[in-house]
Image (cartoon, coloured by chain):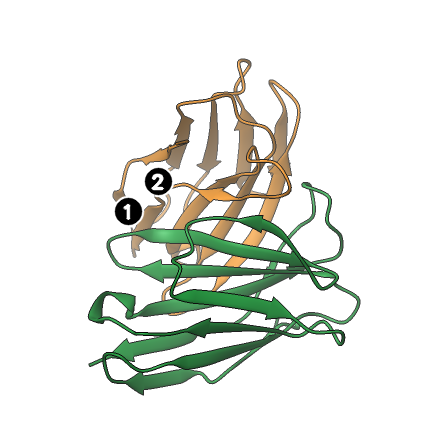
């Protein structure tokens, strides 16, 4: 158990819909990262937040957005869903914003878009 | 953009054989992290390499950073069935902790 929690564990929805994935970081960790893992794309970095502010952006689509709240939990919002958005979405957290911080991954949310 | 390739993509070994995965980048790597993901699980941090030519060991695992910081390797001696999983390298060269994961090497150990 990494100490990072993600809800829900599974999500099945239809194309065009919008969903919200939730992540609670380890106690004391200020950074939250979001990743997308699909079979043909590997592990893709989406976005990072540090202490409530966006810190780094990766391959995140405009249809996707995220935020980190004052209690440090984070939400990833996916809208206008397409079949290709079906994937495993991981959240990770780390203690600081320094590039050498070890990341602790949550169990993931499996999103299926039908 | 930066690409981090890992070879091989898949590897099947007999239990007891050695295994090596290589992580190669098109640009100079900054800090390299290695992660292991068991089937159905999430990535778990193994180690971080920072310095050129650095070598670190964890029991049967040996991690190395290339002298030119363009490649890294993970070597497992005498594999066990518990080593099964996908091994990823990750580079933090993108500034502000933008992370680029390698393509991964899936290891299968045959008992």
Residue lying at the far right in this picture: please name it.
A28
Q: Residue at x 62, y 19 (%)?
A: B52
Q: Decide: marks 1, 2 in contact (CB < 8 A)?
A: yes
Inter-mark Cα distance, 1 to 2: 6 Å
Say which quarter of the image contains residue A29.
bottom right
Quarter of the picture containing the N terminus of chain A is bottom right
Q: Which mark is residue B46?
A: none
Looking at this view, is A44 or A82 the one in front?
A: A82
Q: Residue at x 35, y 35 (%)?
A: B6
Say which quarter of the image contains residue A64.
bottom left
Residue A55 horizontal/vertical position (percent): 64, 51
Looking at this view, is A65 or B63 the one in front?
A: A65
Which residue, given by chain and number where applicable, does mark 1 sit on? B14
Q: Which chain is green?
A: A
Residue A108 visible in rendering: no
Residue B110 horizontal/vertical position (percent): 27, 54
Which residue, given by chain and number where applicable, does mark 2 sit on? B17
The answer to whether marks 1 and 2 sit on the same chain is: yes
Quarter of the picture containing the C terminus of chain A is bottom left
Q: Residues within 10 Å of mark 2 (few under 14, many from 20)?
A: some
Q: Colour of chain B?
A: orange
Residue B84 visible in rendering: yes
């Amino acid at each position: 158990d990494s100490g990072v929690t993600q809800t829900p564990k599974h999500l099945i929805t239809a194309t065009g819909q919008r969903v919200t994935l939730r992540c609670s970081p380890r106690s004391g960790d200020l950074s939250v990262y979001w990743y997308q893992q699909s079979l043909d794309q590997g592990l893709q970095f989406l976005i990072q937040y540090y202490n409530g502010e966006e810190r780094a952006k990766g391959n995140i689509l405009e249809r996707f957005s995220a935020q980190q709240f004052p209690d440090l939990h984070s939400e990833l919002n996916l809208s206008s869903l397409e079949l290709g958005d079906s994937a495993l979405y991981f959240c990770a957290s780390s203690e600081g914003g320094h590039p050498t911080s070890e990341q602790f991954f949550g169990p993931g949310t499996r999103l299926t878009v039908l | 953009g930066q690409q981090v390739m890992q070879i091989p993509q898949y590897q099947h070994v007999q239990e007891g054989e050695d295994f090596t995965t290589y992580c190669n980048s098109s640009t100079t790597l900054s800090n390299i992290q290695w992660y292991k993901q068991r089937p159905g699980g999430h990535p778990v941090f193994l180690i971080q390499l920072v310095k050129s030519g650095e070598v670190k060991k964890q029991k049967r695992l040996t991690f190395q950073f290339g002298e030119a910081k363009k490649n890294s390797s993970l070597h497992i001696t005498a594999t066990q069935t518990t080593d099964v999983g996908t091994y990823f390298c990750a580079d933090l060269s993108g500034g502000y902790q933008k992370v680029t994961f390698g393509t991964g090497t899936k290891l299968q150990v045959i008992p």
